[in-house]
């Protein structure tokens, strides 16, 4: 069982990305469970999936990277022991620190699962957010394996934006996407994790 942590700014498109990934994984025969640390306006669209849908564990009452990391690890363990999915996809709050999330798994009860990290950046609001919330942006992008630059349908990425984002996450690919209609994203992520091309 592997873990995929999905972080990024409030309203950037994390749940929309998650829904697309779940659909694609379903088509590939991969099983997944979801942990939601914060419920936004967009829900998990498990009706488009085959079988009984996807198991969703909502965790409220704090951020899983710090305040309730113990509760989070227990939830992951329970999913591993009872559901045995191939993947657990975790939607983080906008304030979660990827670095702390990785460190939290040092306290996992058993061999820790492999942890992959994905940050969703909002192309439409990037110029404003990077000025107003630089510290948060730095923590969201700094430890991501991959950055998805989302909403490029309404805000085509400029060279300047791409360069700024890359500077926050050296070595991580930055993939411009438009999450609602995006296809083949899971395959591209797998290629990144395997060290291939995207
Ligand atoms: N135009 C456009 N809208 C998008 C895109 N991705 C998401 N949205 C819209 O942006 C809004 C926020 O998307 P969510 O997926 O809920 O974002 P989120 O990061 O999960 O939001 P929170 O969980 O509330 O932080 C919704 O109205 C989506 O339909 C995109 O690529 N293009
Ligand atoms: Mg959401």
Image (spheres, grey):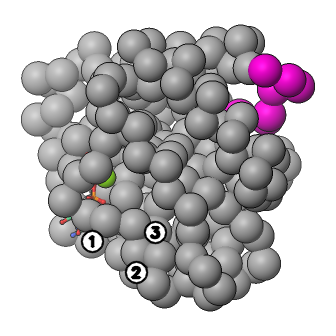
- Magenta-colored span: 109-115
First in sequence, mark 1 or 3: give its number.
Answer: 3
Indicate the secondary structure of the residue bearing disc 2: helix
Residue 120 shows in this picture? yes
Residue 29: where, in percent of width, then height? 78, 78
Between 38 and 11, the one lying in front of the other is: 38
Between 104 and 118, the one lying in front of the other is: 104
Residue bearing the label numbered 3 = 19
Q: Is residue 11 above or below residue 171?
A: below
Ligand 1 position by quadrant: bottom left
Mark 1 neighbour class, 10 Å CA radius: few under 14, some 14 to 19, many 20 or more:
some
Residue bearing the label numbered 2 = 181
Q: Main secondary structure of the magenta part?
A: loop
Alpha carbon separation for disc pair 1 and 3: 18 Å
First in sequence, mark 3 or 2: give its number.
Answer: 3
Foreground label between 3 and 2: 3
Q: Is mark 2 within 8 Å of ligand 1?
A: yes
Between 97 and 35, the one lying in front of the other is: 35
Alpha carbon separation for disc pair 1 and 2: 10 Å
Residue 132: where, in percent of width, then height? 11, 23
Foreground label between 1 and 2: 2
Residue at coordinates 44% horizontally, 19% vertically from top-left?
68
- Residue 173 lies in what quarter of the image? top right
Residue 153: image tag: 1
On-image quarter of the C terminus: bottom right
**6 left or right, relative to 52:** left
Q: Are marks 1 and 2 in contact (CB under 8 Å)?
A: yes
């Amino acid at each position: 069982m592997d873990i995929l942590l999905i972080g990024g700014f409030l309203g950037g498109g994390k749940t929309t990305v998650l829904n697309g990934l779940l659909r694609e994984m379903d088509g590939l025969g991969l099983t997944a469970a979801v942990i939601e640390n914060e419920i936004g306006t967009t829900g998990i669209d498990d009706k488009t999936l085959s079988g009984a849908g996807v198991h969703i564990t909502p965790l409220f009452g704090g951020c899983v990277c710090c305040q309730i990391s113990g509760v989070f690890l227990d939830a992951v363990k329970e999913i591993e022991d009872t559901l045995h999915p191939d993947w657990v996809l975790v939607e983080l709050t906008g304030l979660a620190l990827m670095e702390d999330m990785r460190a939290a798994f040092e306290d996992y009860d058993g061999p820790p699962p492999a942890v992959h990290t994905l940050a969703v950046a909002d192309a439409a609001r990037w110029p404003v957010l990077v000025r107003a919330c630089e510290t948060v942006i730095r923590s969201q992008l700094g430890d991501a394996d991959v950055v998805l630059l989302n909403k490029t349908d309404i805000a085509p990425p400029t060279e300047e934006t791409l360069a700024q984002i890359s500077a926050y996450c050296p070595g991580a690919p930055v993939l411009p996407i438009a999450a609602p209609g995006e296809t083949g994203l899971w395959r591209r992520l797998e290629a990144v994790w395997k060290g291939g091309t995207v």
